[in-house]
Amino acid sequence: MIGIGTLINIIAVLLGTAVGMRAGAALPQPMRATIFNGLGLFTIALGLQMFLKTANPLLVLCSLLLGGLLGEAAGIDSGLHRAGAWLEARFSGAAGDEARTARFVKGFVTASLLFCVGPMAALGSLQDGLRGDYTLLAIKSVLDGFAALAFASTLGVGVAFSVITIFIYQGALTLGAAQIQMLLTEPMISEMTAVGGLMVMAIGVGGLLELRPMRTGSLIPAIVLAPLLVALLAYLNPLLLSLLSLAGWQ
């Protein structure tokens, strides 16, 4: 079972999207643009707050660079866009309308990344799987619901299909919670949060404010690399200290 928290999250996003699409249709374009800009600024500020959790900025940088290389080699960002285009063609029945397809894909990719890269998604899913405590995911659901409302008012129904990503990502974490919890330490979680924060900032800069195109999806492997690098440093530090001691440097 994927967990009650994830189901609540999915329902909240769907409800927020439905309300947002109705509200968006009633708003004039200048007002929708202003709302979108506000969302972009808030997203950047949220990402910065998450990044400040790091205790080792260099580790975050290495995670992003290596993760970006792996993501590009795997074609993750392109795959997300192709998935969005396929969903739009499959369910909207408006194939051939390039503007509508681009809007759908942007809504799907932006919402999918934003709803899944934060620490609440990972930690809430682990709590739900280990103890049946979905409090954190319930709080996240409220936030995601309002975010979906705002996004859907400008990006449309593509936002609703982000629930597929939520289902797969949070569901997998919930099901594998016992094994994952044994591996993660507080420093690992902090660096994962910091990496996720930079990805959230990239969403604000590239996806919402459109200041510079960014292939944010390709950075997804960085979230996995961050805890691995923390573990590697924890393993190497005692070894390096021992070698320095033997060499008479201490």
Image (spheres, grey):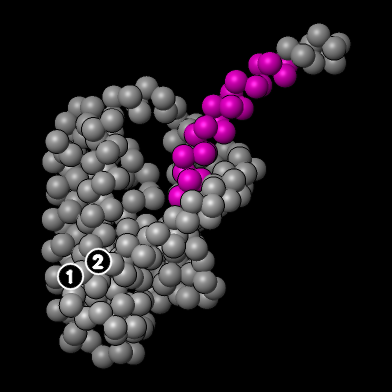
What residue lies at 79% left-to-right and 11% top-to-bottom?
245
Q: Residue shown at 39%/50% (left/top)? A: 117
Residue beneath disc 2: 87
Image side of residue 9 versus residue 126, left or right:
left
Can I make out residue 45 in this image? no
Residues shaded magenta: 219-241
Quadrant housing the C terminus: top right
* Neighbour tally class for label 1: few under 14, some 14-19, many 20 plus, Cα within 10 Å: few
Comparing 148 with 155, the one in front is 155
How crowded pointer 2 is (Cα within 10 Å; few <14, some 14-19, many 20+) is rated as some
In the rendered structure, does residue 12 fall within the stretch colored magenta? no
Quadrant in which residue 81 is drawn: bottom left
Dot 1 and dot 2 residues touching (CB under 8 Å): yes
SS for tag 2? helix
User: How far across and down, in percent of the image, does residue 84 sit?
Assistant: 31, 66
Q: What residue lies at 41% left-to-right and 25% top-to-bottom?
A: 183
- Residue that mark 1 sits on: 91
Looking at the image, residue 230 sits to the left or right of residue 149; the answer is: right
The three-letter amino acid code for the residue at tag 1 is Phe
Q: Secondary structure at mark 1?
A: helix
- Note whether 97 is above or below 15 in the view shown: below
The location of residue 178, given as percent across then percent down, is 29, 24
Q: CA distance from mark 1 to mark 2?
A: 6 Å
Residue 144 bears which disc, if any?
A: none
